[in-house]
Amino acid sequence: MADRLRLLWVGAGLLLLMFVPAYLLTMTPGQGIPRDGTSLVVGRDFLNIWMYGRAAWAPHPELHYDMDTYLAALGPVVGEGYPGQLWSYPPVALLFAAPFGLLPYLPALALWTLCGTVAFAVSLRLWTRQRALILLLLASPAALLGIMSGQFALFAAAILLAVLRWREERPWLAGALVGLLLVKPQLALLLPILFIATGNVRAFAAAALSSLTLAAIVALIWGVDIWRIYLETGIANQSLVLSDPDHLAGPFMPTLFMNLRVAGVPVSWASAAQMMLGLMAAALVWLRFRQRPAAGDLRANLLFLACAVSATPYMLSYDMLALAALAVLLIVAGQSGAILLLAFFLPLLQLAAGMAGVPGPGLIPMLIALLFLRDEKKLHRPLKVDRTGS
């Protein structure tokens, strides 16, 4: 266990030492907002969140689902000719982004990053009291990519970890938190199966109620039509990333679909393979959780997160953060196996393989799930979280 943790610390330390200074040194002033070495603004994807926040206070934010309209709105902020941005989040994102839209971009980005970091650290406290582990995970590849991208990733990981930890002890609260994942619904695809398999009616009902409530609030504030436009145009905008002939997102998406697309496999074949993998992921969650493992069962929770990653074609490297957290907790609990190290370093492995056009990392989460399902049948002894954090 000590050797594996040391390896994780060395890897995270080297990443920090190489990546952070290199990133800072490539920054240029830009037009009002600093740019990084790729010509994108600092915070990258947060630019979309911030624009959602600004649009939340303006009439007809649904118009931004039209790409030309959105790019025209971006022009005064970042200058003409900025690399394409997509307005593709579900309308619920307007609720979360609205407070940040009241601030200038850089202060808003700083506050967003601080809130996400605190939320993730607090959720980890539900699983461990070891500050060193929390710091290690904040320096993990998935966390760094999420912070650099200004993404929802730290919030999403915090929500997932809290839902898994509280699903038995506080089912109404756990279910209510699921509604917050409407910002990125692909992360929550398998949670209903988990709740049904475990007979957790209260968590399932709370998840449905919170999701419907948030959707209704959005419709009440911005009109019902915003949901129709999102279904017709917003989802289509997201599909552009998957069908991109240049595979610009390929190095950052450890999914079977994108791995196959980068390798030159046609969309229809890649979609069929992804669908089969998704059905397998759903079946594994059902098989494992109908046995009703305890909420603190680390192996069962890691299996769930690995299947959740495998179930969708649209999953980016920073969305692996909750998976990395459970992998580290299992190492501390005494679980052996190099596969846990792969879970921690998966974003880097995907980046290298994606840039080289080599498929494979997209199957690692499913391999983790299968190995842990096999091990559970052999061991008959779950590894549970240490409530003392020692």
Image (cartoon, rainbow, N blue to C red):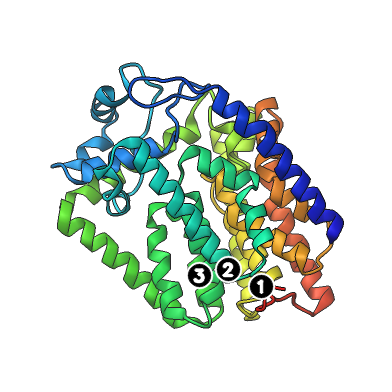
Q: Nearest to the eye among marks 2 and 3: give it.
A: 2
Q: Secondary structure at mark 3?
A: helix
Which residue is identified by label 1? 288
* Residue 66 screen position, x and y as percent: 26, 33
Which residue is identified by label 2? 125
Report the disc number at residue 275: none
Say which amino acid is labelled 1. Answer: Arg
Distance in Å between CA atoms under marks 3 and 1: 17 Å
Q: Is residue 281 left or right of residue 91?
A: right
Please determine whether, in this image, residue 25 is positioned above or below residue 143. above
Q: Is residue 364 left or right of residue 159?
A: right
- What residue lies at 48% left-to-right and 32% top-to-bottom? 243
Q: Secondary structure at mark 1?
A: helix
Q: Secondary structure at mark 2?
A: loop
Which residue is identified by label 3? 163
Distance in Å between CA atoms under marks 2 and 3: 13 Å
Please determine whether, in this image, residue 174 is positioned above or below residue 358. below
Dividing the image into 4 quarters, which one contains the N terminus? Answer: bottom right
Bin the neighbour count of mark 3 within 10 Å (Cα to Cα): few under 14, some 14-19, many 20 and up.
Answer: many
Dividing the image into 4 quarters, which one contains the C terminus? Answer: bottom right
Tell me which numbered mark, 3 or 1, is placed earlier along the sequence: 3
Tell me which numbered mark, 2 or 3, is placed earlier along the sequence: 2
Tell me which numbered mark, 2 or 1, is placed earlier along the sequence: 2
Q: Is residue 354 left or right of residue 367?
A: left
* Residue 328 seen anywhere in this rendered image of the structure: yes
Say which amino acid is labelled 2. Answer: Arg
